[in-house]
Image: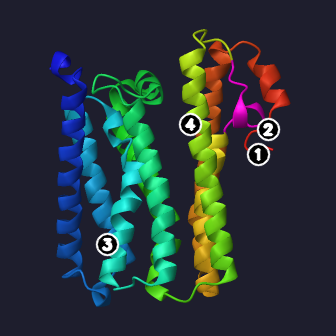
């Protein structure tokens, strides 16, 4: 099995088929709970349960192949699937809805392509998951289910709630919708540039102890995270512009911000501090997020 898992084509095929089946599981669960895919039977709770069911399926595939990284593309694929389905369910193909779809598509496709570019094979697991596995031992299956799979799914779902409401409510394009869209696009650009700059750095610098200090990374320790944060605050602003009464739906973007502040950044910087030279000096001189 280990030799087969080293094959990149086989690995991609496993993930592709797994995600198709996960989509089918999600659709089946939603249909069972709601009775139909019409707008009159729409339920946020049923949609979330269906999303969780699809996530659990991916988790089980990860357990079978002993690789939690099978979940990694779910973060970006989830909105790419759900947002178009909501548009079809509510028959909203207005210009304002298309603008939102463009934002989500650019974000999701870019992130998924970057994952595919950096993905090696099913024998390679994200260092964070291997670290957690080492720390938690026999309880890793629970950490994987709730921490690696279900928690990110919940965060992204909450981030999507404003987008879903935006489509359901509908409305004309306004200056604040454009503002929200521009903020999201800025976030996508930051993510794109930071990923390109990181890949360039890794290809050109062989010394693993050297800290990246080029492009956006010269001013920000985590410009890619900053882009992700901007993306969902922009979507929340688009929704607020069309439905001010749903202001509380910005909660998803706030939780996403807190996740990066208290989980992703400390975990990443804890690792970097162990092998990057002068990391503490770099940390003092460089902002966490703002790349300007």
Q: Which mark is residue 290?
A: 1
Q: Real-space Cα distance between discs 3 and 1?
A: 34 Å
Q: Crowdedness of circle 1 by 10 Å Cα count: few (<14), some, many (20+)?
A: some
Mark positioned earlier in the residue sequence (3 or 4): 3
Q: Crowdedness of circle 2 by 10 Å Cα count: few (<14), some, many (20+)?
A: some
Residue 129 point in image, percent of width and height = 42, 30
Q: Crowdedness of circle 3 by 10 Å Cα count: few (<14), some, many (20+)?
A: some
Q: Which mark is residue 85?
A: 3
Q: Nearer the viewer, mark 4 or mark 2?
A: 4
Q: Real-space Cα distance between discs 3 and 4?
A: 29 Å
Residue 232 drawn in magenta? no
Q: Residue at x 29, y 22 (%)?
A: 123
Q: Which mark is residue 195?
A: 4
Q: Name the quadrant containing residue 276.
A: top right
Mark positioned earlier in the residue sequence (4 or 2): 4
Q: Which mark is residue 287?
A: 2
Mark positioned earlier in the residue sequence (3 or 1): 3
Q: Nearer the viewer, mark 3 or mark 4?
A: 4
Q: Real-space Cα distance between discs 1 and 4?
A: 16 Å
């Amino acid at each position: 099995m280990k030799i087969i898992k080293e094959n990149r084509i086989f690995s991609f095929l496993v993930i592709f088929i797994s995600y198709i089946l996960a989509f089918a599981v999600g659709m089946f669960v939603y249909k069972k709970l709601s009775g139909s895919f019409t707008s009159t039977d729409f339920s946020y709770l049923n949609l979330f349960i269906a999303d969780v069911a699809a996530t659990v399926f991916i988790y089980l595939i990860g357990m079978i192949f002993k690789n939690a990284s099978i979940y990694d593309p779910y973060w970006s694929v989830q909105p790419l699937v759900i947002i178009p389905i909501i548009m079809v369910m509510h028959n909203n193909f207005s210009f304002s809805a298309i603008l939102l779809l463009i934002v989500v598509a650019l974000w999701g496709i870019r992130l998924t392509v970057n994952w595919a570019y950096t993905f090696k094979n099913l024998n390679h697991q994200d260092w964070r998951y291997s670290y957690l596995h080492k720390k938690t031992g026999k309880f890793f299956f629970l950490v994987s289910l709730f921490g690696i799979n279900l928690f990110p799914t919940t965060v992204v779902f909450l981030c999507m709630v404003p987008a879903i409401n935006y489509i359901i409510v509908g409305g004309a394009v306004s200056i604040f919708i454009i503002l929200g869209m521009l903020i999201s696009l800025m976030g996508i650009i930051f993510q794109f540039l930071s990923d390109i700059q990181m890949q360039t750095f890794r290809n050109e610098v062989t010394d693993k102890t050297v800290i990246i200090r080029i492009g956006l990374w010269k001013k920000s320790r985590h410009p890619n995270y900053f882009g992700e944060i901007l993306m969902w605050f922009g979507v929340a602003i688009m929704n607020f512009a069309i439905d001010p009464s749903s202001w509380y739906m910005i909660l998803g973007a706030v939780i996403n911000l807190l996740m990066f502040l208290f989980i992703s950044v400390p975990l990443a910087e804890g690792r970097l501090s162990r092998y990057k030279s002068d990391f503490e000096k770099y940390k003092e001189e460089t902002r966490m997020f703002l790349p300007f």
